[in-house]
Amino acid sequence: MTSIDRSGAAAETRLWHPFSDMSVVRRSEFVLTRGEGVWVYDDQERRYLDGTASLWYANVGHGRAEIADAIAAQLGQLEAYSAFGDFTTRPAQELAARIAGLAPVDDARVFFTTGGGEALDSAAKIVRRYWTAKGEPERMHLIGRTGGYHGTNGYGTAIGGIEANRAGWGPLMSATSSVQWDSLAALEEEILRVGPERVAAVFAEPVIGAGGVLLPPPGYLEGVQAICQEHGILFVADEVICAFGRVGDWFASSRFGLRPDLITFAKGVTSGYLPLGGVVASGRVAEPFWEQSGNMLRHGATYSAHATCCAAGSANLDLLAENGLVSRALETEGPLLAALEPLAAHPLVKEVRGGVGLLAAVEFSAEALAAGAPVAVFEAARERGLLVRALGQGVAVSPPLTISQEELDFLGATAAEALDAVAAASVA
Ligand code: PMP
């Protein structure tokens, strides 16, 4: 009999990490053990300011007992039950109704998934089936944008605009393309190239996240919506990062005055306490499925509308609402940018971006990028007790919405020290 080592402290891990160089990570994992507010602790009891809210999702911060209690209560009552057919649970009904009430989507319906990528693929399949049901089966083309990130499932990979994520898989989903992320002319041109009557939907993150925290030029998103309306194309706002307070409103679409046909969400809906995502669809999009008998959406996963995940979602929405965290994010966007703005003068830095909620990025110069600055700065910051996210052009920050001024000061000062350390090392 072999005994199983439950300490987890194996010399070499068996855990295959996503988006990670396992040739390095296999012998050097970074183990976190607990979290409280904006802070997380490693297995040596060192603490780190979570400048990224993990992967852009811990909106209410770590260690909130209210959510843990709601999860425990639901687990004790009924952990989960399928939502296929007419089955449902109270938490699933409640969370769907709450999200439908918050989302800037006409006559909204909510379809739940287990995360963001599955939400994107669900939205893509819903729009294609919508057009089939409406007697326009040639309307299949899906347009994304350069720099866009829509998860790693089939459709999300195909409409994603980060080239490295698209390479090496062989043929991706057909009838998809990408346009320059900030150009309305490029979008019009692509629609005319494909043929407006062949385009099913345009997908856009209101603020591009993983592609570099790219803020939409003034009027751009409104322009995308107008172009879609002009050609009868559906407009999908991918709010997996932006929704639930991240940009200082419940949805970025509200902040930018948009009324999309569909919104995809995940992350902040539970602040990551349990995995959950979904699609908000307008009454127009739902109509062929909800009004015509026999036209079911033959799509959906085992854990769609999982009762305990939905209970975590409602407890999280309670915290966001009762603690005023959405308006707090709006009030804190200026101070977050102010904490980072001094870095704009640093020799490694090309630009500091932010000011739309608690999303910001420090973009590095071409020379600094060539020398590997994003990962070097990420490492130097972590050594100093700050977690930032290394992206293609720089580092991003997206702290929990609860961050205080003192914690913002620490974030700014520690990021500056990390940049200085990297600059000093590359000169030496
Ligand atoms: N869309 C956007 C805008 C995202 O940022 C992400 C995740 N970072 C996804 C989709 C995919 O979500 P998930 O990782 O939960 O599948």
Image (cartoon, rainbow, N blue to C red):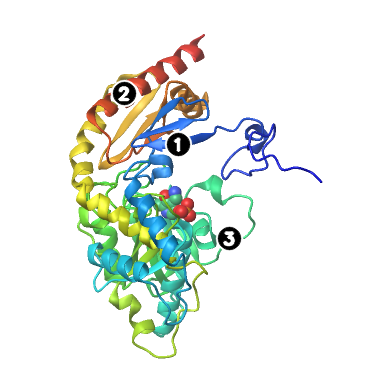
Which residue is labeled 2 in the image? 410
Amino acid tagged 2: Phe
Q: Residue 34's mark?
A: 1
Amino acid tagged 3: Leu
Q: Is residue 427 above or below residue 213?
A: above
User: Of circles 1 and 3, which is in front?
Assistant: 1
Q: Position of residue 103 (x, y in %)?
A: 26, 63
Image label count: 3
Nearer the observer, 200 or 90:
90
Q: Earlier in the sequence, mark 1 or mark 3?
A: 1
Instruction: Work out which residue is located at the far bottom of the displayed protein and give it.
Output: 293
Q: Residues within 10 Å of mark 3 (few under 14, many from 20)?
A: some
User: Of circles 1 and 2, which is in front?
Assistant: 1
What residue is at 52 percent from the left and 69 percent from the top?
302
Q: Earlier in the sequence, mark 3 or mark 2?
A: 3
Q: Is residue 404 above or below residue 169?
A: above
Label 2 within 8 A of ligand 1 by Cβ: no
Q: Position of residue 250 (x, y in %)?
A: 24, 54
Q: Position of residue 34 (x, y in %)?
A: 45, 36
What residue is at 25 percent from the left and 42 percent from the top?
356
Instruction: Tell me the distance, in whole angstroms, between the alpha carbons under discs 1 and 2.
Output: 20 Å
Amino acid tagged 1: Arg
What residue is at 23 percent from the left and 60 percent from the top?
258
Q: Is residue 210 visible?
A: no
For residue 56, which quarter of the picture?
top left
Which residue is labeled 3 in the image? 172
